[in-house]
Image (cartoon, rainbow, N blue to C red):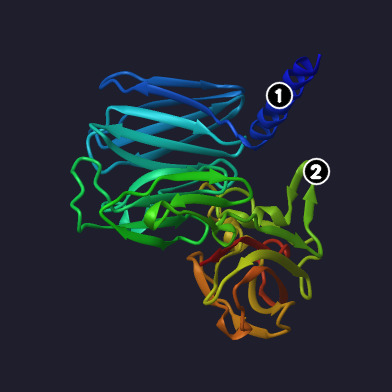
Amino acid sequence: MRLKRLFVLFYLLLFCISCIFASNTKSYESKMNALDNNKDVTFNFDKCDFIARFGDNYETLKIKYNSGSDTKEFSLICDSYVELLSIIKINEQLYWFKCEALGFEQFFIWDLKTDIVFEPFFDMKDTVYISTIDFENQVLFGDTWNSDKGIMPDQKIELYLFSTSRKEHYKIAEKVGETFTLSLLEKNKIQYNGNSGKQIVFDYSDWTKQEIDYSASSFLVEGKTKYGPENLASQKGLPWASANGYGINDTIQIKIPSYKNQKLSFYNGFQSESRKDLFLSNSRAKKIEIKCLQTKKIIKTELKDIRDKQIIDLSDLRIQKDSCIDLEIKILEVYPGEKYKDLCIQAIIPVY
């Protein structure tokens, strides 16, 4: 009877442990296929699919996204001949593309919401072997060991972190004559084997992707068309538009991760590729005031009346590294529209 109780307790303990690990394990939907020279290759996901084919050469991939009535097209430019393509669905908004050929791997990230494709390797992609990825937070880990060669006893191996949100890399550790073995832990932590086999935990919370939140004191709604503040996250699609005509004294609030030397990419007016006349037809911002609600510092700037991207330096706001900050942008003066009063701003995107 006593032995039976021990067995019951043992299996209960195993069940609890398995539940804990199961709750911390995140699975992502992934598809892989070989690419054919003259044929489309389709990757089917729930509610959407991707059609891939080679472009003019074996280093360019043409991708078409289909989801009901929504269709988007973009290209991936690879560094070498590509044979296999793996598409990993992280969520309804984020997809990772992994191109493979003869042991070579190259990653791309596509954000459905902003319709932006970027490569999360930056300036060290040719020397660092990526071994572990936190897909959801868009953080990659790799070391300087080339897996095709043996390691010399005096060879220095360096472990790096790559952050797509901060567009930076960071050296975590180094050691001699031995590679790193990594494992992702919960709550933005990674464990690796340090010198003498010691297991070390590194917290990379400061490097993870953080959402940017937009709000405004007003926004225009015309029938079923909404010119809301969320439109400011992308230079494509509809802009934000004031519900108060010229929008004088209207404010836009942006909550963003905070780092030193931050800037804003400002896309003025209504910028439409198919209707370029809308830029002059609607009003554009001329003078604005930007306030950091944490530091209470204020800067004023005058914008050019152009369609090109304008970079606004925020250094005078005295922003320091923190979890996030709140910026408040106030409209002081506008370039009046030739046809409509409505003040439009296409996008305001943080630059790190």
| Quadrant where the N terminus is found in the figure | top right
Q: In this view, does 325 lie above or below 67?
A: below
Q: Quadrant of residue 346?
A: bottom right
In-image side of 156 versus 351 (left or right): left
From the top left corner, tell me how far across and down residue 32 is, in percent. Answer: 41, 24
Residue at the (45%, 50%) spot, across then down: 192
Which residue is depicted at the point 49% across and 27% down?
A: 30
Where does the image place residue 6, in percent across and percent down from the top left?
75, 22
**Residue 148's x, y, as percent?**
20, 40
Q: Residues within 10 Å of mark 2 (few under 14, many from 20)?
A: few
The disc placed on residue 295 is none
In the visual, does 34 lie left or right of 283? Answer: left
Which mark, by number, is residue 10? 1
- Residue appearing at x 43%, y 20% in the figure: 42
- In the picture shown, does residue 100 fall above or below 276? above
The residue that appears at 37% across and 29% down in the rendered structure is: 85
- Residue type of the residue flagged with mark 2: Gly
The x and y percentages for residue 14 are 68, 26
Give, as a three-letter code, the residue at label 1.
Phe
What's the CA distance linking mark 2 and mark 1? 63 Å
Please say if 316 is above or below 293: below
Total numbered labels:
2
Read off the residue under disc 2: 223
Along the line of sight, which residue is nearer the eye, 243 or 192?
192
* 189 or 104: nearer the viewer: 189
Up the image or down, 44 lies above or below 111; here it is above
> On the rendered structure, is 180 left or right of 226?
left
Residue at disc 1, secondary structure: helix
Q: Can I make out residue 336 in this image? A: yes
Judge depth for marks 2 and 1 and give the one in front. Answer: 1
